[in-house]
Image (tube, coloured by chain):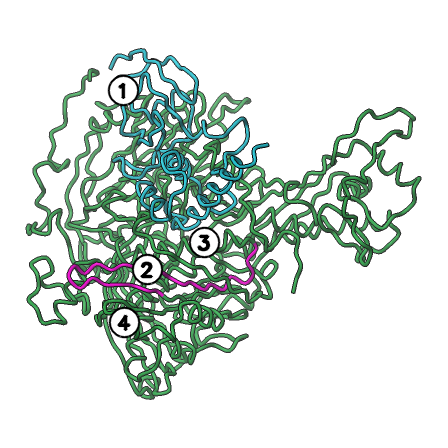
Chain colours: A green, B cyan
Amino acid sequence: MSDFSIIGKPTAMVDAAEKTTGGGKYTDDLSVPGMLIGKILHSPYPHARIKSIDTSRAEKLDGVVTVAVGKDAPTPFGILPVGHDEHALALDKVRYVGDNVACAVAVSEAIAEKALELIDVDYELLPAYFDPEESMKAESDLIHDHKLHNIEKDYHHAFGDPDKGFSEADHVAESRFIANEVTHAAMEPHCTLASFELDPHTGNLGRLTVWSSTQVPYYLQHKLSLVLEMPMQQIRVIKPLVGGGFGGKSEVIPIEIIAAIAARKAKAPVKITYTREEVFWAHRGRPRTIIDLKTGIRNDGRITSVKARVVQDGGGYCSYGVVTILYSGALLGALYDIPNIQYDGYRVLTNKPACGAMRGHGTVNVRFAFESQLDELALKIGMDPAEIRQRNLLKPPCITVNGLRVQSYGLPECIEKTVERSQWKQRKGKLPKGRGLGIACSHYVSGAANSIIRSDMPHSTVNIKIDRDGGVVVYTGASDIGQGSDTMTAQIAAEVLGCSLARVRVIAADTDLTPIDIGSYSSRVTFMSGNATLRAAEEVKKRIAAAAGKKMGCGPEELVFREDVVFKQGSAPPSAKKDQIEEVEVTQQGASVSGHVEGQILRGSLQQKRKEEGPKDWMTFEEAVVAAIDFHGALTGTGSYAPPPEARGGKHKGGGVGPSPAYSYSAQVAEVSVDEDTGEVTVHKVWAAHDCGRALNPVSVEGQIIGSVWMGMGQALTEEMVWKDGMLMNGGLLEYRSPSSVESPQIEPIIVESIDPEGPFGAKECSEGSLAATIPAISNAIYDAVGVRLHESPFTPERVLAALRAKRKEKALNLTEGVDPTAPARFREHGGSLCYKAKGPERHTLDPARREYPAATGAD
Amino acid sequence: MKKELIELKVNGRGYELAIEPSALLLDVLRQDLGLTGSKRGCDESSCGACTVLVDGVAMLSCALLAASCEGREITTIEGVSEHGSLAAIQKAYGDWGGAQCGYCTPGFVMTVKSLLAENPDPSEDDVRNALSSNLCRCTGYSQMYEAIKAAVAAERQAVQSPE
């Protein structure tokens, strides 16, 4: 059992005080002299050609400095190298209601908003596509000309012999599942502040500095360079505090580039902040997905074959789409032992805001389908759902049939612990009427083994500097978005160097100062940036140990670094070390140094004293640092991490997505009640066991487990983006139904530590792996409670009630006629009212697309 | 709109400000006074991130006209730390993981302050109800309950054994 001084202890985040005092700055809290405000004009149509844009009336408005349009930056971009299909401001077409058309820059937000109404855009409406299974049949009016049938990408994989596997099955289940669309809804709306310096030599616009609410400052730097046609080195991206991302800021969002284009055109700093509604339109959330799943098992519970056909409603642009559709198939593997897998995935374009990456990515909706179907099969053979999962465990270390390498595997312990804590065996089937227990498992990558922009370069690099003030400065590109990566960085550096946490200062995510880290997405930061931090700290430690060893007359390998002291192994570390730091009196020249400042090194005077005393068994951390600086000058170290080649997966098409150096595991039991009169589902408690390798900071790990289970519960019960003709009907936090405290259950996180051989101190991810299991744990619990099997999420009261009434063979209510959530057929288009029956493109009389433009005046 | 002069009392200090009559308290705090701790998280007064105390009562500053707050004592998150050190609730939120991304935290702290002023020893149900007008997307609220319990205990101890 390891005995760490900092790792594994509950630690307040290093920036907690900034957050609890309101002193920390998020992007919208920043302002620079001469700053102007930008407002974006969005498309009111789902699919239209832009015939002309006339900004003259807007530009004449007093207080308006400029109006930027697509022509000002016509280079396309996208997060994936294969998906450079969007323009910051639309060039010739708009592809969703909310697409970005122009940006008015003015001295105040009010004037910029008024200017938007004075921008005249002439649109030619095009037929629009809303249902992905319909969109896939398109022959003309394609959303992107080069994507035939509006299919962004499709994959067809077969591993093992799926058909043979089905023939060997004793029981086969085959159903359609539908998971409706959800979005991140991070509390901080996107915001970007862009400011050009003036070049002192030419007097022209010089370097660009951009502050942005982003998870990926280095991708932002890269895409800015592409679109603005400037060298990356001339662009500085700084990430301030970020108020949540969950994937919604894991790609470059148009607002970020629009701000820079506007700043360039206005020749002044420009800040743009999204309204909450704009955040919903920017989206990049989890696509609504159709999963046609078929699973075969034998009588002994062993899975023989799985076949999944997945259709994702991707929206108007590629975004992360190719990766999302691959994750849906890839992570069928690496959880259970499945010998045969067939996967057909379709990422389809539609005229809606684009979908991207959201916590758990493409794995979540398929996991909902799989864990639900596994329960159905368990019932068929009369096997306990916990047991059937235990019958299908992997035997690591191994490589799955689809090329994923699995090493540490805490799933068995996760299942055991959650079954034990929830008293599953004692209580299942014995709860009062309307109350039930459900179990499900899930997993996720600890970072993708293959980076988005393929190369052999490291995924993370970290630099450390220690100088005479005794402070340890860690320069890391890792982006803290609230998950606590700055704290993780400080903890690892402090543990390796054996210094106190307070001594460490983390400088992060500033492209001028910190080496590249590819970003906070796919839960890679602890594993990859943590490893880079560890290596950088080890490198610096070696130099300190060599110097300290010389002073103490021993080899560096004999030294222990702990709690601000460096001591010889075997000797007792000084307990009251602070008392033993003496007043320093005399230097080489005989001049006296007045006073002594605790923990600081003034000159080499300390060594002078030590020389007189002779070698001891211990030195303070500062003394050891000074000894090393005497030899080297300021101590610097660097560490990098790239995933090992054996973790990078198979060579099949699309095989680059799914592989990871390590997977986290989750097993959850949910306890629910279902009101059979209203269909309302109450989640009483979720026991969530999560294998995170090692919990570097238990408080943070528990917080992440609880947060992801909670977000999964939101997707399971209440969260849903409601669409009608490409219009989002519920673009607000309450309408979107993000749960408040009274709607949120007790969640008991259970940390399982499988100590990964490659993770930093054995750590793996803990932020995404749990979300997926919560949804089927709840649907399985609903079945246990009232005997209805929901195949469509979220399990709203309408859906649950419709299923209950159907089961009781009662007449369907008007609201739910034609809707069978136990056997959903297609996505249901909604209207502002469920009674709205008209088809698009007829629009309501108050629709902005029908409004006459007011004449330009300067008056209010 | 022509600006008018108002006097606002914020965190114990008086400020004379020239503002448009339609200016919201949230915007005046953030832009005119540079008190950026109160946040805007939504468009329709539904998230609570802008919560401040007006005469000790938790109010949504995005739903108040700055002009209508003349003569009232406004307390923002910046006015919570006591004499340069963290208040018990602020320390507890840090220790117990009540804040992850921190964006909703100022609003929650103000709501908690208002709750504890009314009900110094709330049950977990009392706490859930009181927090229901503040939205959080990170924490699932659980660790906030621990933090609040710890802060209540810390305050009680401080009262019982004052230094």
- Residues marked 3 and 1 touching at CB (< 8 Å): no
Residue type pointed to by label 4:
Asp
Name the quadrant containing residue A792. Answer: bottom left
Direction from residue A489 to residue A726 in the image, left or right: left
Camera-side mark, 3 or 4: 4
Task: Give A652 or B85, whichever is nearer the viewer.
Answer: B85
Q: Are marks 4 and 2 on the same chain?
A: yes
The verdict on residue B94 being magenta is no
Direction from residue A461 to residue A792 in the image, left or right: left
Instruction: Measure the C-alpha gap from mark 3 to mark 4.
Output: 28 Å
Q: Are marks 2 and 3 on the same chain?
A: yes
Disc 1 designates what residue?
B68
- Residue A823 drawn above or below residue A681: below
Camera-side mark, 4 or 2: 2
Residue type pointed to by label 1:
Ser
Extent of the magenta region: A670-696
Within 10 Å of the Cα at label 2, are there few (<14), some (14-19), or many (20+) other Cα atoms?
some
Direction from residue B71 to residue A570 in the image, left or right: right
Disc 3 designates what residue?
A704
**Extreme-front residue of the structure:** B160
Secondary structure at badge 2 equals: strand
Instruction: Measure the C-alpha gap from mark 2 to mark 1.
Output: 43 Å
Indicate the chain on which mark 3 is placed: A
Q: Are marks 4 and 1 on the same chain?
A: no
Residue A728: image location, x then y, percent: 21, 46
Indicate the chain on which mark 2 is placed: A
Task: Give A296 or A427, whichever is nearer the viewer.
Answer: A427
Secondary structure at badge 4 equals: helix
Secondary structure at badge 3 equals: helix
